[in-house]
């Protein structure tokens, strides 16, 4: 499995990681931070999974498919949580998570 074969998935994971990092930082600046706690936690988990998935795909690891399968699951959970919030950063993150989940599911299939 070469990195070029997974270029769109690597890009989706990178975009999602950035969106999640931005979302978690923005959530921490919201007036009711406690209401955003689950969002922040999922953002951080999702960003980490996305970074690992992109790295493993880039190096052609035998474990990339398994990690991408798990990454898709985390992205779905994060996307669902972010979609519950009206903040623009959450909505952008939810979209990035949905896109990444779709790419990871295709890659892992």
Image (cartoon, rainbow, N blue to C red):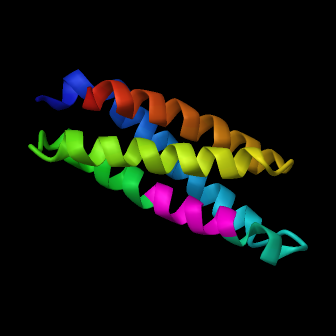
Image spot of residue 29 (x, y percent) = 80, 71
| Residue drawn at point x = 21 percent, y = 22 percent | 5
Image spot of residue 48 (x, y percent) = 41, 60
Image spot of residue 74 (x, y percent) = 47, 51
| Residue drawn at point x = 46 percent, y = 28 percent | 102
Q: How many marks?
A: 0
85 relative position to 62: left or right: right
For residue 91: magenta?
Answer: no
To which quarter of the image does residue 94 belong? Answer: top right
For residue 42: magenta?
Answer: yes
16 relative position to 67: left or right: right
- Quarter of the rendering occupied by the C terminus: top left
Image spot of residue 105 (x, y percent) = 37, 30
Relative vertical location of residue 94 with respect to residue 85 in this rendering, above or below: above
Residues 3 and 80: in front is 80
66 relative position to 47: left or right: left
**Is residue 54 shown to the viewer in this render?**
no
To which quarter of the image does residue 36 belong? Answer: bottom right
| Residue drawn at point x = 53 percent, y = 65 percent | 44
Q: Magenta residues?
A: 38-47
Residue located farthest toward the bottom when viewing the structure as drawn: 34
- Quarter of the rendering occupied by the N terminus: top left
| Residue drawn at point x = 79 percent, y = 77 percent | 34
Residues 64 and 6: in front is 64
């Amino acid at each position: 499995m070469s990195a070029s074969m997974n270029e769109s998935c690597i890009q989706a994971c990178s975009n999602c990681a950035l969106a999640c990092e931005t979302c978690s930082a923005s959530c921490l600046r919201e007036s009711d931070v406690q209401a955003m706690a689950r969002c922040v936690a999922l953002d951080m988990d999702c960003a980490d999974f996305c970074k690992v998935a992109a790295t493993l795909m880039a190096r052609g690891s035998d474990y990339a498919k398994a990690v991408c399968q798990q990454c898709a699951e985390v992205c779905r959970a994060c996307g669902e949580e972010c979609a519950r919030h009206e903040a623009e950063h959450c909505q952008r993150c939810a979209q990035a998570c949905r896109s990444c989940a779709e790419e990871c599911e295709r890659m892992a299939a």
